[in-house]
Amino acid sequence: MHPLTGEALTPDAVAATPPQAIAGLIDRNPVAEVLISADGTATMLFVTSFDDPVATARTLSDLPAPEGTEVTLAGNPVIFAQVFDVLSLILLAVPPLVIILMLAVFYLNIGDRRLSALAIMPAIVGSLWTFGTVFALGRQVDIITVIVPIFVIVMGSADGLHFITHFQDKATETEDKVVMVASALRHVGVPMILTTVSTAVGFLSLTFTGVKPIAELGVFAAVGIGFAGVISLFSLPALMSRLTITPAYTTAILGPRVTRTLERLISTRRPAIGLTVLILLFAIVFIPRLSVDPDQLFFFKADDPVRVAFETTEELFGGATPLFGEFVYDPATGLNGLAGIAAVERELEALPGIRKVFSLADLADALPPDQVEGFLSGTAALPFGEMVSSDGLRYIIFPSDFGTDDLRGWLEFAEDEPQIKLLTGMPVVWDEIARLVLRSQVVSLLAAFLLVTALLGISYRRLRETVISIIPIALTVLTLLAFLAASGIQLNLMTAVLSSIVIGVGIDYAIHFVAAIDLARASGAGYAFRAIRSAGRPIVANALGIAVAMTALWLSPLAIHSQVSMIMWVSMTVAAATALLVIPALLPKEAIDAISHSTVEDS
């Protein structure tokens, strides 16, 4: 825009203008400070989309840059375009790899290909039904809900694994299919129901967060877990009764070794005490360092082109995402109403973290009155789009390097200043999300603990068993929170709610182990060892299966998904270890009676 005539400057006109004249035009242009970097090597272009901003971002990214020119794209549509492209990759590539990894782990523990496939079959079907439900309801998939089928596959396979493992164990004693099915249902039927409900409860606790994407993740994952549980309970007994089972687990690579190792570990309370003390020290040191990450690009890796583009824009112009607001302004006052607004702008610019505030008030002293009137009336246009509404004057804040305290200072100023109607923008949205993340962490954790404790209390009707079942998962959550701080992952929209999911999933191990202990107790002393032989192998297989399968998320180019993988590795490992080691240490001495231990050593 020519600063004197207000006419557009065409490429031909610029090319024909001497450099000295261009420098003069820039010096006299009232928006040059906003659009040109301090070193004069870069300029900012505003692109206004009148239809689909994401499609516009994709179109711009496909355009070749002019020779000798470097083009950097930044802004929310660029983020959304990149994320949408990633979602299709996750949906198509990650679930099949998750299934392959889980099958491999299950086979290492079961030693039978058919049974390994049957163990995971209910979860796969449940995942398909879940996505069918999502699309039938007209819901869209986002970066959080896209991992619902993965959660359903890895966590919904626990029931099938426990049923098949016990069925396989019983095959060493009888060939009667009715007896094997009845025994499996008697030993793991009730725990299967409890674990399905407890896992679903862990996900449903996310509905208390008040954050819509997280709540949808909780609801749909809970539905999928329910589908998988129902299929496991009703389909597997019928399918297994038609198969001839060979107890091949005795030759499985991990199965017998896992059982023998666990038996040796629980023969004394020292491993459980050592593990508990280590977890408590880890939590005491690192949990106080836990912090919330307000970065709106938290789901992108450090070298992702989107993050690099934003960092480049911030370096040149102070911020890739400007803030927007509106001053109180009556268009009928014309130029007379701009002086007071200009004064408020200067006060805003004096606040820490603000590089420049721009509105039409900045043009009042720089352009002829008739041109300013043209902008106010809408007959002339600026690169920033419409700047006047029926009762207000739009303004743009271009930030420099700012923090959360700076942003909240701006918001407090806007709230106290009667001349300002509104201040908003993505930095404001993400600051509010950061607050919601912290609240979500507290609310979902409390809800998950209370719901799971109530479920166990109603089911067991005995305080001792309820408390014993809760202790391992409490230690697991402490480990998870400390790991977040120690690894520098920080709390964000996704990581803040994983602790609630871990409660619902990790409690499954305690439920199955406590059920095995109750059944083994009737046979006398040493019942902890018999419980380990019954439930230890499937618990370890499931925990290892979840951890290994979640490694598939490293295929995703989004940082948030690899973080989920790391968190699940730590959480599932600790959940299984605390359930299998700490629970026996809380039992009476007869549970690990020396007579039974001698039997273990002989084996």
Image: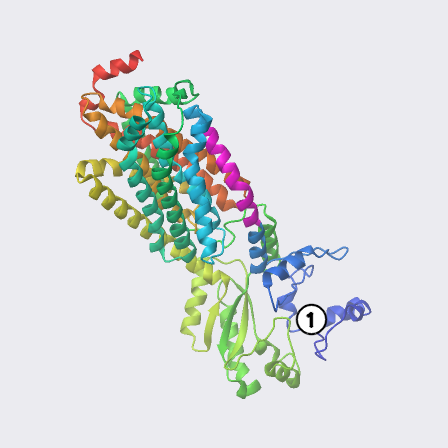
Q: Residue furthest right?
A: 16
**Residue in view at x 43 percent, y 35 percent:** 120
The residue where tag 1 is placed is 27
Tell me which segment is drawn in magenta: 86-105
Answer left or right for 220 relative to 353. Answer: left
- The answer to which quarter of the image holds residue 577 is top left
363 displayed left or right of 543: right
Q: If the image is split into quadrants, where does the N terminus sit?
A: bottom right
Q: Position of residue 539 (x, y in %)?
A: 35, 31
Q: Secondary structure at mark 1?
A: helix
Rendered location of residue 109, percent (x, y): 41, 25
Q: Percent x, y for residue 205?
A: 33, 50
- Residue 487 appearing in the image: no
Q: Main secondary structure of the magenta part?
A: helix
- Depth check, front residue: 23 or 177: 177
The quadrant of the rendering that contains the C terminus is top left
| Residue visible at 41% across and 48% down in the picture | 491
Does the magenta run of residues contain 101? yes
Looking at the image, which is closer to me, 38 or 160? 160
User: Please, is residue 62 above or below residue 247 in the view?
Assistant: below
Crowd around label 1: few <14 · some 14–19 · many ≥20 (10 Å): few
Q: Nearer the viewer, residue 193 or 438?
A: 193
Give the amino acid type for the residue marked by disc 1 in the picture: Asp
